[in-house]
Image: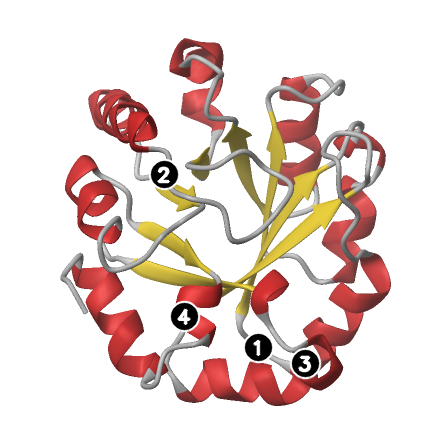
């Protein structure tokens, strides 16, 4: 299975977002990870539909939209229309999980289910056959720059094994504290989409850093 790097917009220079996008494109970054926070589901507020629409007009990169919001079902169609390619939402949200998956598919988008560090992997087993990706949070959602939680590695491994047993080609994505030391851990556990923020944006050589992250090697 091919490996990908998804760059977290939270770590970009928001005053110069278009130039940051060009830098990501030049660096061969695969996806742009777009965190949406409502200040209720998580204790932070980020950006929303107008920014996504602007980003969509500026790039053909795959837009990996992560909805950290209380009622994702209410907004799925709007984020799909704004240009999302993947839409992930939390199993811990108040919306009906299967209804959200169906809504994403109906919009012709890839459906992803996100799970917090403390949520048992068993909570998502019934939904695995219907997913294009599982997003395992390796930090508590809501803020960038947190330290990687090593106890989440087993969850990555278990979910990858369950997907393989189903014969599913769904991706396993990880988000939070991904760097030279943690990338090999999650890659070896079965993650093939690594979200990276400040580590990627601050790299002297973004393209080389992304390549090494995909390979799970130390920089």
Q: Is residue 67 left or right of residue 45?
A: left
Question: Cα distance, mark 3 to mark 2?
Answer: 30 Å
Question: Cα distance, mark 4 to mark 2?
Answer: 24 Å
- How packed mark 3 is, by other alpha carbons closer than 10 Å (few <14, some 14-19, many 20 or more), is some
Q: Secondary structure at mark 3?
A: helix
Q: Earlier in the sequence, mark 1 or mark 2?
A: 1
Q: Which mark is residue 60?
A: 1
Residue at image mark 2? 170
Q: Is residue 132 left or right of residue 58?
A: left
Residue at image mark 4? 200
Q: Quadrant of residue 215?
A: bottom left
Residue drawn at (37%, 80%) of the image: 28
- How packed mark 1 is, by other alpha carbons closer than 10 Å (few <14, some 14-19, many 20 or more), is few
Residue drawn at (65%, 51%) of the image: 35
Of marks 3 and 1, the one in the foreground? 3
Question: Cα distance, mark 4 to mark 3?
Answer: 15 Å
Q: Which mark is residue 82?
A: none
Horizontal and vertical percent position of residue 164:
22, 28
Q: Nearer the viewer, residue 55 or 207?
A: 207
Residue drawn at (59%, 21%) of the image: 91
């Amino acid at each position: 299975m091919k490996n990908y790097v998804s760059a977290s917009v939270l770590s970009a220079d928001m005053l110069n977002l278009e130039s940051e996008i060009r830098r990501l494109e030049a660096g061969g970054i695969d996806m742009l990870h777009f965190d949406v926070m409502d200040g209720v589901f998580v204790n932070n507020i980020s950006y929303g539909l107008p920014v996504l629409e602007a980003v969509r007009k500026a790039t053909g990169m795959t837009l990996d939209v992560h909805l950290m919001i209380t009622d994702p079902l209410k907004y799925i169609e709007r984020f799909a229309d704004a240009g999302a390619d993947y839409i992930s939402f939390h199993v811990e949200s108040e919306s009906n999980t299967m209804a959200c998956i169906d809504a994403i598919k109906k919009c012709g988008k890839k459906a992803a289910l996100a799970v917090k560090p403390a949520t048992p992997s068993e909570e998502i087993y019934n939904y695995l056959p219907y997913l294009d990706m599982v997003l395992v949070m390796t930090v508590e959602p809501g803020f960038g720059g947190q330290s990687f939680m090593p106890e989440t590695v087993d969850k990555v491994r278990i979910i990858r094994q369950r997907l393989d047993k189903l014969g599913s080609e769904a991706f396993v994505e990880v988000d939070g504290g991904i760097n030279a030391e943690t990338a090999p851990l999650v890659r070896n556990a079965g993650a093939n989409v690594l979200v990276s923020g400040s580590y990627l944006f601050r790299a002297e050589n973004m393209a080389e850093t992304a390549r090494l992250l995909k390979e799970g090697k130390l920089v």
